Image: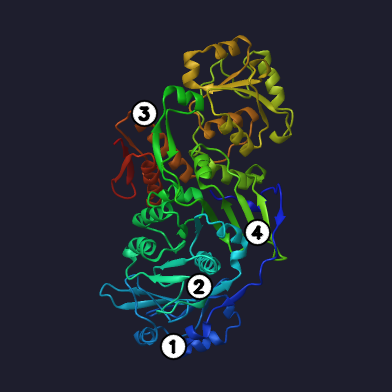
Amino acid sequence: MELETEQVIVNAVTTTNEMDTLQITDDLDVLLAVLPIRISRALDAVERRSELIEVVMDLGRLPEARFDSGELTLSDQEITPADLQYVIDRIGDFGADNRAGIERTLHRISAIRNRRGDIIGLTCRVGRAVYGTIEIIRDIVLSDKSILLLGRPGVGKTTLLREAARVRGDDRRVVIVDTSNEIAGDGDIPHPSIGRARRMQVPLPDLQHELMIEAVENHMPEVIIIDEIGRELEAVAARTIAERGVQLIGTAHGNTLENLLMNPTLSDLVGGIESVTLSDEEARRRGTQKTVLERKAPPTFEVLIEIKDRQHMVIHHSVSEAVDALLRGWTLSPEVRRVNDDGNVEIARSEPAEENEEEGRHHRRRKREEPRTAHNGSRSSPASWNAGQSNGHGRSRELAAVVSAAEEPSQRRPLRIYPYGIGQNRLRSASKGLKAPIQIVDDLKQADVMMTLKNYYRQQPQPILDAERRNVPVYILRSNTITQMEQALIDIFKIPAEPEDAFSAAMRETQEAIQQVLNGASMAELKPQAANIRSQQHQLARAANLISHSYGREPNRRVRIFSQ
């Protein structure tokens, strides 16, 4: 999940040794030498060459240079086939992945081809070896634990891998499985930035998983480094390597652990998800529904690092615990590391409950077990209680006084809740997200309100009968989810509800449809949605081990979910 860590409260801050001064090697002159003369001269005249990311050359268009802070047109002459051929003649051969390089450099040239296979565009990306970036996570890399680096394209994952190979290569046998020669550069002699580590080149991207296993079987490595794990076979190979006792350091595209968990191809890297049916006794003990999502297996990687940028990282030191917490709807508090202005590493623990109002809403929407649903709990008088209305009980008037004592929920005295059959940790998470003060009590005599599920209320067990006899308001939830608890607290504390966006509404509808099918329905049909939303709906269905298909034509194309 994506934490807005700029607003987190720091419980404890420790400072490591001052980071080494960053040393950057880019061999930029070598890249400029393979570009057409008018383009290289234009780049020579640019003052911010150190910020250059890539040069784009598309047939029939003006050449562009892309920087961290924008783009720059390099010539008023369009790119011709001769310009493209000029570059092609001066670089290495293109592989099956349409990537080439310049020998003994880290630069990468990627091609765009037409239907006939002719090259009609080139992206010349600057490769830089940045020494010292590993200092922010050096202790983790040296811990012998398998590490997965997660981040968006261009955030610096490969740079960190290269540094990890150099640092680990000083005292371990390190083998790099280099799919596109991006880690150790083009040519048979690897770039010196990887230190003493050895490099295995992959002839075809589809064979990457085989090279991963071959590296373990043939070269006795203690550390395997692999960039861009993106296929299911590669995920399986990674698990095989980890089970053989070899430290694995790899990368994958994604922003947060939650994103990775919902990716059906790569979720196995963090243990995977499966739908489990609990016994009645176990479901009652947990305070959950009978069908729940659980982690399928031990995670391949023990530590997951979310790279926000080169100087800001979020670290999950125990992937298994983090995944279990996500699936149960608990609040995560990962470690947050930053490099301050003095070059020191600050280590803090995030506290999502301290987010500001806008960020808190976004955070809750992403963190909760299922998207927001409209609260549909029964509140029939006198057994159930409707916030804002007196049902004739003295306790209700007393409760109304509690929730109207101050304008802000966080300024009111805690509301004492007696939970019956609902998850207490989820209730605490819901109250933290809303900044609604509550106190969970285990004695009905001390309770301002009881909160239970519809199924339990229908059975009328003794605690609920006692609550009615004592005139304790009973708040009834439709399901044991953070969403329902939040809606109940919103009603009790009279918190203004946020408008529901289209994506959240679609995810809510999908969760409800999945629950219908899990409860015995043969099929559930969703409302028409855009392609990107339908894709997320299919992922949720797969995570619950259900079948889903899209039907109809745009703009009325929609998803149907079926049982196995």
Distance from Cα at disc 3 to Cα at disc 1: 65 Å
Q: Could you tell me if the residues under marks 4 and 1 are in contact, i.e. CB atoms within 8 Å? A: no
Q: Is residue 45 visible?
A: yes
Label of residue 196 in the image: 2
Q: Secondary structure at mark 2?
A: loop
| x 49%, y 67%: residue | 158
Of badges 3 and 4, nearer the viewer stands 4
204 or 447, which lies in front? 204
Distance from Cα at disc 4 to Cα at disc 1: 41 Å
Label of residue 338 in the image: 4
Sequence-wise first label, 3 or 1: 1
Distance from Cα at disc 2 to Cα at disc 3: 57 Å
Residue 316 location (% of width, % of height): 56, 50
Residue 387 location (% of width, % of height): 62, 24
What's the residue type where badge 2 is placed?
Arg
Circle 3 sits on which residue?
Answer: 519
Of badges 2 and 1, nearer the viewer stands 2
Of badges 2 and 3, nearer the viewer stands 2
Sequence-wise first label, 4 or 2: 2
Sequence-wise first label, 3 or 4: 4
Sequence-wise first label, 4 or 1: 1
Residue sitting farthest toward the left = 116
Label of residue 36 in the image: 1
